[in-house]
């Protein structure tokens, strides 16, 4: 019974860390896509993640251009430290450094792909039910996915009322997730559940 409770506790802690990592990567992607910083949802994400990102900003500096290195570093360190902590609690000891670094990269990539996956679903639903929605959440989703949709639309323009670009992006997300992230997890030698799958 005690071991089951301990396992459930570790699963819960790992899930909460993955949710926080999801928010950190959302902050990173909102900056990269130049989404509206003053959107209430953007502000909420910044406020929730600032306690972890702040210390990294003090030595990596503020955001320069589109890529927020402090947020990326914060997500990476958070995930690596959480994997070490879980290994120590389980009693396995310190995992190999190379495996840890690869697992950290896989976790960031996994979180980014999941954000795009869910954002694409929301965008498709919005395009059916409320194509001209002006809700802050709807505007943020559109701003988030536009940088990955625009290049695909240039290659595959809409056919009348039918836009095939979301299907192409979905396939690309699944391929990258399966091939790249899957390969990284196997190379890390660390359970996919710990990485964030």
Image: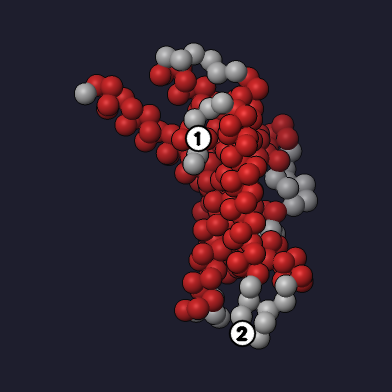
Q: How many marks?
A: 2
Mark 2, other Cα within 10 Å: few <14 / some 14–19 / many ≥20: few
Q: Are marks 2 and 1 in contact (CB under 8 Å)?
A: no
- Colour mode? secondary structure
Residue 155 locus on image (x, y percent): 76, 70
Viewer-proximal residue, 52 or 85? Answer: 85
The residue beneath circle 2 is 161
Q: Is residue 43 visible?
A: no
> Going 52% across and 22% down the picture, which residue do you hit?
84
Image: 59 above or below 140: above
Q: Quadrant of residue 35?
A: bottom right
Residue 69 locus on image (x, y percent): 71, 41
The residue beneath circle 1 is 192
> Going 53% across and 47% down the picture, which residue do you hit?
23
Mark 1, other Cα within 10 Å: few <14 / some 14–19 / many ≥20: some
Residue 46 locus on image (x, y percent): 57, 49
Image: 62 above or below 175: above
Viewer-proximal residue, 111 or 174? Answer: 174
Secondary-structure class at tag 2: loop
Residue 159 horizontal side relative to residue 40, left or right: right
> Going 64% across and 49% down the picture, which residue do you hit?
176
Residue 156 locus on image (x, y percent): 72, 72
Q: Quadrant of residue 116?
A: bottom right
Viewer-proximal residue, 36 or 165? Answer: 165
User: In this view, which residue lies farthest toward the left?
Assistant: 1
């Amino acid at each position: 019974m005690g071991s089951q409770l301990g396992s459930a506790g570790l699963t819960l802690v790992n899930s909460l860390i993955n949710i926080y990592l999801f928010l950190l990567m959302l902050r990173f992607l909102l900056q990269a896509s130049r989404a509206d910083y003053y959107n209430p949802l953007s502000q909420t994400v910044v406020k929730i993640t600032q306690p972890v990102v702040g210390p990294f900003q003090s030595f990596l500096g503020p955001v320069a251009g589109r890529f927020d290195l402090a947020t990326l570093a914060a997500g990476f360190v958070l995930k690596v430290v959480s994997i070490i902590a879980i290994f120590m609690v389980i009693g396995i000891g310190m995992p190999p450094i190379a495996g840890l670094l690869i697992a950290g990269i896989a976790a960031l990539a996994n979180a980014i792909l999941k954000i795009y996956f869910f954002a694409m679903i929301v965008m498709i639903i919005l395009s059916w039910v409320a194509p001209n929605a002006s809700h802050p959440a709807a505007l943020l989703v559109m701003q988030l996915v536009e940088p990955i949709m625009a290049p695909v639309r240039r290659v595959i323009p809409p056919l009348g009322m039918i836009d095939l670009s979301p299907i192409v992006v979905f396939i690309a997300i699944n391929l990258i997730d399966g091939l790249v992230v899957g390969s990284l997890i196997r190379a890390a030698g660390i359970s996919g559940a710990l990485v964030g799958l």
